[in-house]
Image (cartoon, grey):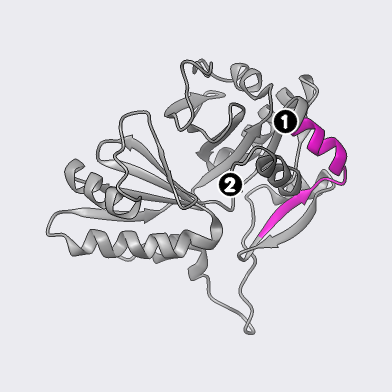
Amino acid sequence: MSLEFLSPDAATTFDDRAPALRSPIEWAHRDAGAELGERAGWRVVSGFGHPDAEADACRSSVGVADLSFLGKLELQGEAGLVAEIVSGLAGGATLAPGRAALHEEVWWCPITPDRVLAVTPPEQTATVRDALDQAAAADGGFASVIELTTAFGSNAVVGPLAREAFARATALDLRPERFEPASFAPVSVARTAGMVLRQGGDDRFLHLFGAGFAAYVWTVFVDAAESLGGRAVGTDALAASLRSDGTPDA
């Protein structure tokens, strides 16, 4: 059975136009005054009309950004084969429990020894998916690739108070000495199954969760951010903040 229908880029065109790919809670962003831009076929929130306040939140408190456009590709198979495929596509990286690897802007995140999630910029999702499919098919062992881009929501939580925002929703210990850069954990957040990745810099986290909980999770984290002097932010403020500390854009 083909699972191609799970791939956003496989959407059928109409009148020679491809349908726009959207966050599952674009309606909520519109209600909040979001300004929408385009990236690799996705409609993305570039800002909420307050660029200075959004940039300040990322620098001095906490900003929450919807990054639903990030690709999510799960590789499943025998542990040794999964490790071999990941190593071949991730520049020789060897994954360890709780430790992700970054290669050419793609995060390789070990959920279990036989399941790895690749988180990609939207421009690379199809390329990485095709490379995973080819690698899985080339070996005589069993491995499969499932696209989960629209099955998972993803938010960036950034800023010096990002850990405090998470502390209001999860028991995961995010102190720098316990959750180092590139740390990755499948964990319950706001009583919802999810995953947390610490990206470059001390104050940058990616939270992944079931897309059906996107509105709930967004509300939990924006409320937490606002109580800490932060706010919802768009990709413009987030990108400027990422560049300011040398971290590649999402």
Q: Where, by quadrant of the figure, is residue 32 drawn?
A: top right
- Tell me the SS state at disc 2: loop
Pick whichever, 211 or 104, lies toward us: 104
Of the numbered discs in the image, which one, if any, rests on residue 248? Answer: 2
- Image point 48% across, 70% down: which residue? 10
Quadrant placement of the N terminus: bottom left
The relative height of residue 250 versus residue 5 in the rendered view (above or below) is above
Q: Residue at x 57, y 32 (%)?
A: 205
Q: Is residue 223 left or right of residue 193?
A: right
Q: Reply above or below: 125 against 72.
A: below
Q: Nearer the viewer, residue 163 or 215?
A: 163
Q: Alpha carbon of mark 2 to alpha carbon of mark 1: how far?
A: 24 Å
Nearer the viewer's eye, disc 2 or disc 1?
A: 2
Name the residue carrying label 1: 222
Which of these two is toward me, 207 or 27? 207
> Does the magenta run of residues contain 52?
yes
Q: Earlier in the sequence, mark 2 or mark 1?
A: 1
Q: Which residues are magenta?
A: 43-58
